[in-house]
Amino acid sequence: MFDKEKTGRESYVTRRELLKTGGSAVAAIVAGNAVLRRTDAENSSESVVFGIAIDLQKCYGCNSCSVSCKSENNVPLGNFRSWVSQYNKGTYPSVKRHFIPRMCNHCENPPCVKVCPTGASFKREDGIVLVDKNVCIGCRYCMSACPYGMRSFMWKKDKSGDQPYPSRIFGVVDKCDLCYHRIDSDITPSCVNACPANARIFGNLNDKESEVSRFKAIHPVSTLMPDSGTKPRIFYSGLDHEAAHVSVNAGARMSPVESDSDSGGE
Amino acid sequence: MSIEKTSAICEDHNSLPESSCDISPVTYKEITEAGRSVGSSFKTATILLGLVLTGGIAAWINQLINGLGETGMQNSVSWGIYITNFVFFIGISHAGTLISAILRISNAEWRRPITRAAEAITVLALIFGGIQIVFDLGKPERLFNVLISGRLGSPMVWDVICVVVYLMSCIFFLLLPLIPDMAHMKKQKGISERMNRIYSKLSFNWTGSKEQKHQLEKAIGFMAILIIPIAISVHTVVSWIFGMTIRPMWHSSIFGPYFVTGAIFSGIAVMIIALAWIRKTYSLEKFLKTVHFDNLSRLLLIMSALWFYFTFAEYLTAGYGSLPEELAVFNSKLSGEFSFLFWSMIVLMTIAFILLLLRKRNVIKSSVIASLLIVIGMWLERFTIIIPTLTRTAEEGYKAGIYYPTMTESMITAGSLAGFILFFMLFTRYFPVISMWEMSEAKTALNIRNKVMESYLPDSPESELTEKSIEV
């Protein structure tokens, strides 16, 4: 330590100390950040992880899920969080129409969360991938990163301005949130509830006794783009590979068109 | 040590005027007074560019009020020409500083009249590139969330960090060599009070003493080395925004070097255009000679060849591998809805390459035309890399999202380009476009260089001088 009177440089030591502690603090934050993000309690059997299994043998493409989703979550005109993509395979007389209900896959390894610059996109402990609409800056990087194309953007500004969630905040990214507000009150998601064919089975994937786990155990289930390493938590039973491929590669970009003009959509 | 030696040489050498180690104001009257003699066409151009810039600002205000629904972007194609412009402008920014830094380090003597313009282009291109991200945000008022709650895991945050660091160092790299010239400029007569104040501020009490000069050279040398890795990191990280995702034809490890090559390529092209304009507008033919354009054309030719190589490698890998999802994007570029843009790019680049090869007859003209083609081609390259992956049509009969920029986007883009050109014009109007003190040192440097070269010969004695001694 320098004598204050001798050196006349009061701040010399403190500045150095400040830099030292500041530097180590930054290093600690960086290291801590990297470590903490890796801790994942999801795979332990006690925790709850939600998922949906969809029985495609039962789905007949009525779009009840799409409609109930829109009304439940106040999704604006032109945007969809969930829809049913269709694919016709073969030619008459051997022809089949495949329906693939699409929604966010709530991936175990979500590419959208990985790229978010602000952490507005995040994964809850129960595996639900959410967007914090009060943090999102609207850069749409997550939309570019999502291989399934399941995110949408609040393009058009409402005349009434921003409304608090669950209503609309414009200029941010919107996506399926697995109706977490319903899940938190112990009710099934809206699309599961609305399905007239009972094609959607919702539950805790970590609970071996749950309905969804039993369904997965006795039916051969598959996911969309299983080889991409995203590990989706939406499972399909009876998925046709060709239909799935088109649904993701073209169909993802084929979310329903809804026009806000009187002429109507496609 | 080297100070004494070089100054000794300076004094010994009788053929050089006494002030050759300092700025010689008589020789460079053309530069000091260049800005004063601008014609009416300069003013007309300024007004026109100002109008386009105002139009861009108006379009942006409209977009702020009405949201991003004003653009042609949609849920399927969520990025448009703002991101294209961002990559394009950041690319141009590599012109400058990287080239000037590399040429400084490698002691390329012909660099002296071109470094100032290059450094100015860099700073402006970075500002106009960075601002594109703000145009693209849905909530620009939340931009600082990146600082408050930024995640180091996001390539977007890497980008923010690298671009900010690069901008800071480029401003520093522009201002440092400007100091002696500012000291010279403030002594000039007939300068307005306001400009004089700016010159005095930027001259940072420069007296021209040997110690100051030594420190300045040292600082510039340090910055020149520091700035090269920073510049390369910037465009690498820009490419990683795309490369780090798992989308077809973005997820490519070649993107880092491919983007850096493209960046330097378009950067040199912009430099050639700017230098040709400076040469003509300020009648500086004496300084910016054909040889400078010839040398820059050579560099451009090398980058062009590299660019073709990378493009070929990238597309061959995607096309030959033929992964179904990659093939969908590949086909949309080569024969689909983007084929016009893609093949235009290839044709423009090929014509530019041939023009550069056959430049001998009229070096300046052919290099400028080639550069213009390259700049357009590089913008198309950025566009055809970014957009098709987002639209990607697959099987027949399925039309995915298609993207057309709207009026708002076009106006903001035109405004950015106009602003970039306008501010560069104003810079050249009020600041010396050619680094005068570095020009005046050329003769001394040449003298030392000769002695050093001589010492390389087998019969001559070892010289105590090295190439380093050129820095006073």
Image: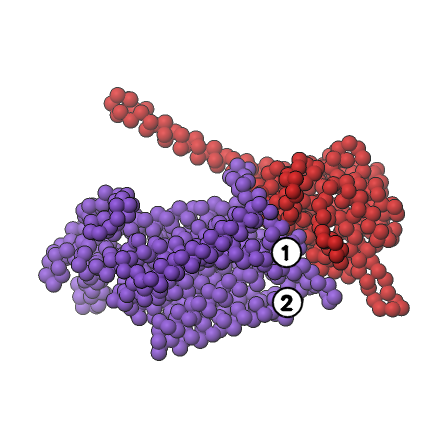
Helix, strand, or loop for circle 2? loop
Residue at the disc numbered 1: B77
Of A76 and B260, nearer the camera is A76
**Mark pair 1, 2: CA separation:** 14 Å
Where residue B378 appears, x then y in whole percent?
49, 64
Q: Which residue is painted at 50% across and 69% down in the image?
A: B308
Check residue B257 in the rendering and tell me which mark sits there, or answer none.
Answer: none
Above or below: residue B14 compared with residue B141: below
Q: Is residue B413 left or right of residue B291?
A: right
- Which of the chains is purple? B
Label pair 1/2, CB-CB below 8 angstroms: no
Report the chain holding disc 2: B
Q: Residues within 10 Å of mark 2 (few under 14, many from 20)?
A: some
Residue at the disc numbered 2: B337
Display colour for chain A = red
Helix, strand, or loop for circle 1? loop
Q: Is residue B372 left or right of residue A88?
A: left
Where residue B51 appears, x then y in whole percent?
45, 56
Q: What's the amino acid at mark 1?
A: Val
